[in-house]
Image (tube, rainbow, N blue to C red):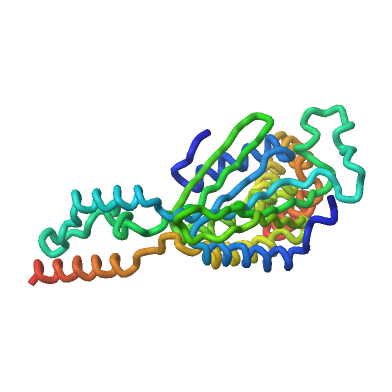
């Protein structure tokens, strides 16, 4: 199914939208999946590597293989008693070539960090207060 | 289906699983926001009324972190869960977190595991293998074995890395 995948740039744009949609709804999940792409998109589906009479044929392929990254959310239907809207399932996927892997994951991390709101942030204020208190206490004790 | 306590442990086990089954294993990460249901909210409120926050001024120590989690009864539960699953062997390795600070690091480790999937050599191992080849060259016996192993996994980069390492060593000597 070569037609289904989108370019990496398009994938990031849509992934940002997916996170944004989730944030607006205030409820729901975003699934991210990554997997090795074993079947080259330009062949008819039979994997030539499997012909080799080696049970561990897949642990040492001749060339680095692309990986497929998918993202999707869940379909949600309107529940009585809530103000949630109907949302259809959104599925996006992209192929990452081995030479673009590092660059892809740098951007991927940025998009995820920006998109995953609501997770607990580091409590810097508390720690600072504690430190100040401790310092103050020590000073008093010394004095 | 183990749920690991540290992300480092999860990464280590996942990379081993990916090395064993690089074609079938997949990593699914799930970011989820759950609004508490009405019953959950009432439960939380009950809990809060039963366990009032200890006043900071009276004890001098901050309240334990468990009470901080249920400060606001209507607050959604947000989690980020990572799963490495191999459908052939049925192994499923999990790690879950609720901390925003960990997301960047976890996606970074997803990237490193992605290198395993793509059959690219690991970044960290690249240098260590080069060092091992250098060290083994002096011993004689160990060197060919190491090189054999590496050639199976990654023939191209090993030659580059090994060659570079050797040249550097020779220059120093």
Q: Is residue B36 above or below residue A54?
A: below
Which quarter of the picture shows residue A112? bottom right
Q: Nearer the viewer, residue B125 or B2?
A: B2
Where residue B3 sits in the image (x, y, percent)?
48, 39
Q: Nearer the viewer, residue A84 or B74?
A: A84
How many marks do you count on the picture?
A: 0
Where residue B33 sits in the image (x, y, percent)?
48, 56
Residue B143 visible in the picture? no
Q: Residue at x 52, y 63 (%)?
A: A25
**The C terminus of chain A lies in which quarter of the figure?**
bottom left
Q: Is residue B122 above or below residue A60?
A: below
- Decide if residue B100 is on the left or right side of residue A41: left
Q: Residue at x 65, y 63 (%)?
A: A15
Where residue B157 sits in the image (x, y, percent)?
77, 52
- Decide if residue A41 is on the left or right side of residue B144: right
Residue B154 visible in the picture? yes
């Amino acid at each position: 199914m070569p037609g289904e995948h989108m370019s990496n740039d398009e994938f990031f744009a849509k992934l940002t939208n997916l996170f944004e949609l989730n944030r607006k709804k205030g409820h729901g999940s975003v699934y991210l999946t990554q997997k090795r792409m074993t079947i080259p998109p330009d062949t008819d589906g039979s994997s030539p590597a499997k012909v080799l009479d080696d049970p561990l044929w897949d642990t040492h392929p001749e060339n680095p293989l692309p990986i497929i990254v998918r993202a999707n959310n869940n379909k949600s239907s309107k529940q009585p008693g809530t103000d949630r809207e109907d949302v259809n399932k959104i599925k996006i996927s992209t192929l990452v070539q081995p030479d673009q892997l590092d660059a892809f994951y740098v951007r991927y991390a940025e998009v995820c960090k920006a998109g995953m709101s609501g997770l607990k942030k580091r409590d810097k204020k508390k720690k600072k207060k504690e430190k100040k208190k401790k310092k103050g206490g020590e000073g008093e004790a010394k004095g | 289906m183990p749920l690991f306590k540290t992300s480092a442990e999860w990464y280590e086990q996942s990379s081993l699983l990916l090395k064993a089954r690089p074609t079938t294993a997949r990593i699914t990460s799930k970011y989820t926001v759950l609004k508490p249901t009405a019953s959950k909210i009432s439960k939380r409120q009950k809990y809060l009324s039963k366990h009032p926050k200890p006043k900071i001024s009276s004890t001098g120590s901050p309240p334990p972190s468990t009470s901080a989690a249920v400060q606001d009864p209507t607050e959604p539960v947000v989690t980020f869960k990572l799963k490495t699953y191999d459908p052939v062997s049925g192994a499923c390795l999990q790690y879950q977190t609720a901390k925003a600070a960990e997301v960047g690091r976890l996606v970074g480790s997803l990237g490193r595991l992605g290198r395993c999937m793509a059959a690219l050599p690991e970044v960290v191992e690249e240098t260590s293998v080069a060092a091992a080849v250098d060290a083994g060259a002096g011993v004689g016996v160990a060197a060919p074995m190491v090189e054999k192993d590496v050639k199976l996994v990654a023939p191209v980069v090993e030659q580059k890395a090994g060659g570079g390492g050797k040249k550097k060593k020779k220059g120093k000597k």
